[in-house]
Amino acid sequence: MSDLEIISDIRQFNRYYTAQLGLLQQHIFDSEYSLTEIRVLYEINFNRQTTATGIREALQIDAGYLSRILRKLEKAGLVWKHPLPEDGRSSYLTLSDRGRRLMAKMGTLSDDQIRQMLAHLPAADQQTIAVSMRDLRRLLGAPGSEITMEQVEIRTELVPGDLGDIISLHGQLYWKEYGYDVRFEQYVLETLHDYVRAFDPRRDRIFVASSMGRMAGVVAIQHREGKEAQLRWFLIRPEFRGIGLGKALMQRAMDFCREQRFRKVYLLTTNQQTTAAALYKKWGFEKKGSVPEKLWGHDLFEERYECDL
């Protein structure tokens, strides 16, 4: 897709969404206030207290225009000015009780408007829209759009679609990040098939991390002979890296191994997975073997890590 096509798609969405929410109307929700005035009130309400400078920087609004808006809102009894203790010539802004009531009303009207917009869609499509908008804000670097562990759920039961997602996620990421060909995806498929076929709920456990219906990461423990276990398919989706999800999954996996009194846990990886290897070492794994192999279109070393429990 060319940059002109991308720009065109974004502009078409902007036109549609602006019209859908009535953002070009002179007044919002038949009130006496414009969109810009409501945005100023929202900034004050969101920050509890702020300054004109803070609002101007947040909204990228002309200082003179903002000054006129603030005078109107103050005259209407929606905004209060308070002298700054360190500089009596400057003020910080808060909403009055009337201002807070107005914002609560606007919030309810806005919620109802969006609820009506989504009412004809099934729950899965509503979630897709929410996830897409969250991704949009995150990719554009919007404040407060960072992913956190509070947005992630970790479960131990497979649900329909999980197996396909694990295979697909491995195939796509290892192709993008390491250039592994489709034979790697086939390898993941075959090993998952073996895991499910021989699954023993007492000795096997899979940990699936998801966020708003999308798989965020996975790791599994598969029992082996002689009170040993294998750690498998450890993977974190890129946008969920760096928030502590890898540590959380490893913690659960290793706790399970100790609960089941496995004598040893091992894993197989390659010399290319240096970041994962560093994490394994933090959990007590040591490299015990390295064998040259030609795998998935690459000349590499297959490495074995072990952890005695």
Image (cartoon, rainbow, N blue to C red):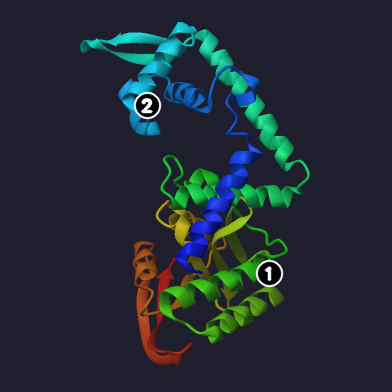
* SS under mark 2: helix
Badge nearest the viewer, 1 or 2: 2
Amino acid type at mark 1: Asp
Give the image location of residue 118, x and y in percent.
Answer: 72, 42
Q: Relative to 75, is 245 above or below?
A: below
* Contact check, label 1 and label 2, Cβ < 8 Å: no
Q: Secondary structure at mark 1?
A: loop
Q: Residue at x 42, y 69 (%)?
A: 308
Q: Is residue 230 visible?
A: no
Mark pair 1, 2: CA separation:
59 Å
Q: Label 1, on which residue?
A: 200
Residue 176 or 223: which is nearer the viewer?
176
Camera-nearest residue between 100 and 67: 67
Query: For residue 159, what is the image quadrant?
Result: bottom right
Question: Is 96 drawn above or below residue 23 in the view shown?
Answer: above
Label 2 crowd bin: few (<14), some (14–19), many (20+), radius 10 Å: many
Determine whether, in the image, residue 157 is placed left or right of residue 304: right
Q: Is residue 28 above or below residue 179?
A: above
Residue drawn at the location 45% of the way across and 7% of the way down? 75
**Can you see residue 307?**
yes
Question: How far across and how far down the image is residue 197, in percent?
Answer: 71, 77
Mark 2 belongs to which amino acid? Ile
Q: Earlier in the sequence, mark 1 or mark 2?
A: 2
Circle 1 residues within 10 Å: few <14, some 14–19, many ≥20: few
Which residue is labeled 2 in the image? 55
